[in-house]
Image (cartoon, rainbow, N blue to C red):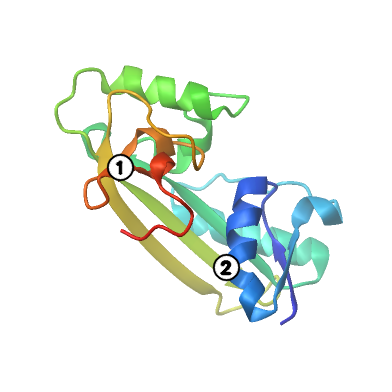
Amino acid sequence: MKQLVLASNNAKKLKELGALLLPLGIDLIPQGQLEIPEAEEPFPTFVENALAKARHAARLSGLPALADDSGLCVRALDGAPGVLSARYAGEPKSDARNNAHLLEVLGHQTDRAAHFVCVLVLVRHANDPQPLIAEGNWHGEILDKPRGEQGFGYDPLFWVPTAGQTAAEMTATATC
């Protein structure tokens, strides 16, 4: 597999995933470059949404496709924003508005435990009966105010105790 369609138009995801796949000799092509519109994400789980996006990109490109669905789950909010993380404050998508909305909803909650979820799905073709699925969680806490300039999304609010900094204060090569 030399070419792979990324079922996303997010430039920061393209940069992160492209850097990971480059040493493997895989050319990651953003779906927008192939004029593939974003897929709907109507499902209540990260796995279902990632699979729908991967199948959509593979169907329209004729190439293998990689999709992710990821988000922030806050324990005190029963897992919200969850699959709605990118649009938590409504349309249009805005990291700043999402962060402000999260802080407003959390208020003075003392339980600030949270975790990021990321599900990656790779399909070899649109009807692949055995998609490759990987899921990971990254545990931390939500701060009262943003810190750091790196990353995107909720990174400035996501404190990682084992690292002693927010995700937005870490470099791309940092390990926790």
Q: In the displayed structure, does residue 56 sit left or right of residue 77?
A: right
Q: In the displayed structure, does residue 115 sit left or right of residue 129?
A: left
Q: Could you tell me residue 92's position as x and y percent?
A: 63, 25
Going from N to C along the chain, the mark reached first, 2 or 1, is 2
Whether residues under marks 2 and 1 lie with C-beta atoms below 8 angstroms apart, the answer is no
Q: Could you tell me residue 148's position as x and y percent?
A: 42, 34
Callout 2, which amino acid? Leu
Q: Quadrant of residue 52?
A: bottom right
Q: Residues within 10 Å of mark 1 (few under 14, many from 20)?
A: some
Q: Quadrant of residue 126?
A: bottom right
Q: Residue at x 37, y 49 (%)?
A: 116
Q: Could you tell me residue 32's position as x and y percent?
A: 79, 50
Most extreme residue toward the bottom is 1
Q: Residues within 10 Å of mark 2 (few under 14, many from 20)?
A: few
Q: Which residue is mark 2?
A: 20
- In the image, residue 5 above or below residue 88: below
Q: Residue at x 36, y 61 (%)?
A: 175
| C-alpha span from label 2 to label 1 | 23 Å
Q: Nearer the viewer, residue 44 or 79?
A: 79
Callout 1, which amino acid? Gln
- In the image, residue 16 above or below residue 71: below
- In the image, residue 31 above or below residue 143: below
Quarter occupied by the N terminus: bottom right
Q: Residue at x 65, y 63 (%)?
A: 18
Q: Which residue is mark 1?
A: 165
Quarter occupied by the C terminus: bottom left
Q: Secondary structure at mark 1?
A: strand
Q: Nearer the viewer, residue 117 or 175?
A: 175
Q: In the displayed structure, does residue 75 sit left or right of residue 58?
A: left
